[in-house]
Amino acid sequence: MPSKEQEVLEDYISKHNLKVTRQRRCVLKAFLDCENHVSAEELYHTVTETEPKIGLATVYRTLALLTQSGLASEMDFGDGQKRYEHRYRHKHHDHMICTECGKIIEFNQPSIEKLQEEIAAENGFTITSHKLDLFGNCADCK
Amino acid sequence: MPSKEQEVLEDYISKHNLKVTRQRRCVLKAFLDCENHVSAEELYHTVTETEPKIGLATVYRTLALLTQSGLASEMDFGDGQKRYEHRYRHKHHDHMICTECGKIIEFNQPSIEKLQEEIAAENGFTITSHKLDLFGNCADCK
DNA sequence: GTTGCTGCAAAGTGTTTGCACCCTG
DNA sequence: CAGGGTGCAAACACTTTGCAGCAAC
């Protein structure tokens, strides 16, 4: 039984005259199994376990495809590489990033989002997306 | 008469057994004259006007020095290059970035910061810095 | 005159692209 | 069997580093 995500991807693929390949299935599967906020390199290493001949370029290309089809979002935590987040059944949230151990805590605070809208409106600005990252130390790294 | 920033830099330099050079003075001056959120490349072009032989590497090295001495902060707006912001007499603020024309509106909303602290505390997290970017369209780009 | 600084070019990092061959539809 | 996909290597953009000569203290 295909996962909901697999359906979403294959829908997108057929709507755009693209093709379902073994590699794309593998990358999707690995992406879904991976913890959130994978980098391309990390995902590449996971994928090579089941698909040893795959190229890093294919992983990048497939991640772009996942992003376009709405399954992934690109994140940038300022560590020099893009990270990819599960998007499909993952509501929007913000991040606390522990600069000691790298742990990422996700949170959601509707009152903050409301204030953002207010201040944007005061400036005649229309928000299409936003990004709030808190850097510091988690409970284990004090 | 040296600017306050020049004093800060030269203090830092003498405290660390470093040296004041013509190039460092030039980069600092250009940085202070530049609009906020310069990239290294942009600053390099400005500096070459008064210091044609300077190397890009020196600009990078000096920007690192400005960052360490507290005069600049590194920013990343996800456009693939670091940008540097005046820090010394520039209070903390967040950004609205127009994805159409690139305009950056700075804002400050203390109630948002207060909510951030609350939610961090609930998670046992201590904030050392944060970053809030709103992406969308400014009043001119609707 | 010692030690740090500079300019240059080369190396690094993460990501993208060109191309000949391969595989899906 | 046509057209997109793949792996590989080369190209990229931005940044950092190694080194021989230079300049500040």
Image: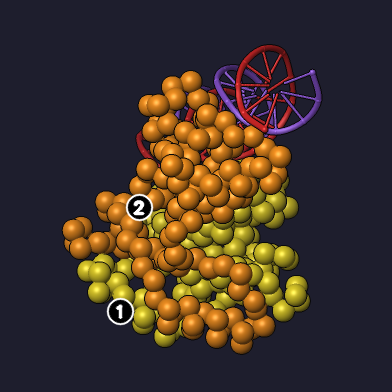
Chain colours: A orange, B yellow, C red, D purple
Q: Is residue B61 visible?
A: no
Q: In which quarter of the image is residue A77?
A: bottom left
Q: Reading the chain from its start, which is encountered first: label 1 or label 2? A: 2
Give the position of the C terminus of chain A as an image quadrant.
Answer: bottom left
Q: Residue B118 carries which label?
A: 1
Across and down, in percent, residue A26 comes to 47, 33
Dot 2: what SS?
loop
Residue drawn at point x = 36 percent, y = 80 percent:
B115
How many residues crowd around disc 2 within 10 Å: few (fewer than 14), some, or many (20 or more)? Answer: few
Look at 30% across and 79% down and name the residue there.
B118
For mark 1, does the 10 Å Cα neighbourhood hold few (<14), some (14 to 19), or many (20 or more) residues?
A: few
In which quadrant will I find the N terminus of chain A? top left
A27, B119: nearer the viewer: A27
Above or below, A48 against A6 in this view is above
Location of residue A55 in the rendering, given as x and y in whole percent from the top left corner: 52, 26
Label 2, on which residue? B16
Give the residue displayed 75% in from the left and 73% down from the top: B141
Chain to which the residue tagged by mark 2 belongs: B
